[in-house]
Image (cartoon, helix red, strand yellow):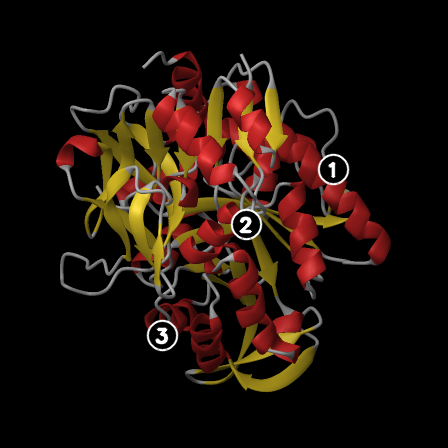
């Protein structure tokens, strides 16, 4: 088994790599090479920053989007998107303009405008631990607390793609899943034992 | 359920050591920051803050090592501050394993820096640390250089400006209360929390668990930070969370992630 952790200048790669190893991954390769993505048995797309900047950085690597399409969508290799890496799975992101995502999960990434019980605005970004509630479709997502840092959230067009939710003023998408793809809004690599357990399940997942 | 209030131990680091040390049972070396971080990770702390209090050139290299070593073993959010001035400073800290970087004096000297950093690294990883002192009833000013230098800048207005420029979070320390163990400066906390749309971390003055509760229920903080309270074993992370839960403040239950060290 080899795990390709995509290095496109937009992620906390060291933490993600160490967490995957702690969760049982034997061969984690931090790479910006589409050939290594094609050769990997599993693929992780991290992401920190703005949607548009991340999408542009990913597309700036010649052949990377095609390699992802071919291996994840074509060959059905297990994929994990983390935070903005998950948001990039959507059709488009509305952050500093409208930007095209990978289009794997129909839906739009929009700025959250959460309100508390008395109608007062909640703090954005959401920074902290929130309770993840698995959806019926979410075979990898367990209930528990995960660490979130985000101002934008993925509004999936189809409920069937939503693998887990959390509550922040309103219900927000915590995880999406379709075919061989899992995406999580939270940071499993920063979610202590909850996060490592999720990574462990994903590493054993045979979709 | 909604997002929970974070309980954050703060490690002040100088010359590669936790200043004043920590007094945990079972640590081989009470001043070793990596060991202390591992202990707080095992106790289920929600985040750790490292502050490089000397921020000298030599110290920065040591801090990066501490951070890298911590991030190899502790899979939890890490925030680092002290002497952060440039894009290169932020990049080095993020690469070593920091999730958020806190900017202090450099943001006072040139506020636009915060916007530039937020655009490059994302708002969510730029925290602005504000050190404030009361100058008259209902008015607080920013002080720099460890509280020695007055700037004449209104702390509440500055916090608002920082959030407008792209700070994702404000780490607010009362210089009047820091080290006094007399509780957070609640009016200051309340004024800043109400003024900014981003989370505010309360800091400075915690003497007991009630102070943590008041920081949230009266001060409106999104997270509570303390150092000595935790370092000297007076209260555990679980004690802090139980106190907050009893007061009706949502927290991640300590059992959710406590690993027996």
Q: Is residue B56 above or below residue B98?
A: below
> Of tags 3 and 1, which is closer to the observer?
3
Could you give the CA–CA distance between mark 1 and mark 2, rounded to whole angstroms?
45 Å
Q: In the figure, residue A17 lies in which quadrant?
A: top right
Residue at 48% across, 56% down = A53
Outermost right residue: B58
The CA span between labels 2 and 3 is 39 Å
Q: Which image quadrant: the C terminus of chain A?
A: top left
Residue at 16 percent across and 43 percent down: it is A157
Q: Residues within 10 Å of mark 2 (few under 14, many from 20)?
A: few
Q: Which quadrant of the view contains residue A198?
A: top left
Is there CB contact under 8 Å for labels 1 and 2?
A: no
Percent across and percent down for residue B83 are 71, 62
The residue tagged 2 is: A60
Q: Nearer the viewer, mark 1 or mark 2?
A: 2
Observer-nearest of B256 and A130: A130
For label 1, the residue is B31
Q: Nearer the viewer, residue B46 or A122?
A: A122
Q: Which mark is residue B195?
A: 3
- Describe the element under mark 3 as helix, strand or loop: helix
User: SS class of the residue under badge 1?
Assistant: loop
Q: Is residue B16 left or right of residue A44?
A: right
- Is label 2 on the same chain as label 3? no
Counting from the top left corner in percent of width and height, residue A91 is at 28, 47
């Amino acid at each position: 088994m080899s795990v390709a952790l995509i290095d496109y200048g937009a992620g906390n790669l060291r933490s993600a790599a160490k967490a995957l190893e702690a969760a049982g991954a034997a061969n984690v390769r931090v790479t910006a090479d589409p050939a290594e993505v094609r050769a990997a048995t599993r693929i992780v797309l991290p992401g920190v920053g703005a949607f548009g900047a991340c999408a542009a950085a990913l597309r700036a690597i010649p052949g990377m989007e095609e390699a992802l399409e071919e291996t994840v969508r074509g060959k059905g290799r297990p994929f994990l998107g983390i935070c903005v890496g998950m948001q990039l799975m959507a059709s488009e992101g509305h952050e500093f303009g409208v930007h095209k995502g990978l289009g794997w999960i129909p839906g739009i990434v929009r700025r959250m405008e959460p309100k508390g019980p008395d109608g007062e605005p909640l703090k954005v970004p959401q920074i902290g631990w929130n309770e993840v509630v698995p959806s019926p479709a979410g075979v990898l997502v367990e209930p528990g607390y995960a660490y979130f840092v985000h101002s934008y959230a993925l509004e999936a067009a189809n409920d069937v793609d939503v693998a887990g939710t959390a509550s922040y003023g309103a219900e927000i998408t915590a995880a999406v899943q379709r075919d061989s793809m899992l995406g999580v809004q939270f940071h499993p690599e920063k979610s202590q034992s909850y996060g490592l357990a999720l990574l462990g399940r994903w590493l054993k997942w045979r979709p | 359920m909604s997002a929970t209030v974070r309980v954050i131990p703060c490690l002040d680091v100088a010359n590669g050591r936790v200043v004043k040390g920590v007094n945990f049972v079972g640590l081989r070396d009470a001043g070793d920051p990596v060991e202390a971080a591992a202990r707080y990770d095992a106790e289920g702390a929600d985040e750790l803050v490292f502050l490089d209090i000397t921020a000298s050139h030599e110290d920065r290299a040591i801090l990066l090592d501490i951070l890298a070593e911590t991030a190899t073993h502790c899979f939890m959010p890490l925030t680092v501050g002290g002497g952060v001035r440039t894009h290169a400073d932020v990049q080095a800290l993020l690469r070593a394993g920091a999730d958020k970087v806190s900017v202090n004096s450099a943001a006072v000297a040139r506020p636009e820096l915060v916007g530039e950093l937020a655009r490059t690294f994302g708002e969510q990883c730029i925290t602005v640390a504000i050190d404030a002192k009361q100058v008259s009833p209902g008015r607080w000013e920013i002080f720099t250089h460890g509280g020695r230098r007055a700037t004449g800048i209104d702390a509440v207005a500055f916090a608002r400006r920082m959030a407008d420029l792209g700070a994702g979070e404000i780490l607010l320390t009362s210089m009047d209360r820091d080290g006094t163990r007399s509780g957070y400066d609640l009016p200051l906390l309340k004024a800043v929390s109400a003024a900014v749309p981003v989370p505010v971390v309360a800091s400075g003055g915690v003497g007991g668990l009630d102070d943590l509760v008041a920081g949230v229920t009266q001060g409106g903080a999104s997270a509570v930070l303390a150092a000595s309270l935790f370092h000297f074993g007076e209260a555990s992370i679980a004690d802090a969370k139980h106190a907050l839960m009893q007061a009706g403040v949502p927290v991640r239950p300590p059992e959710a992630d406590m690993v027996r060290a």
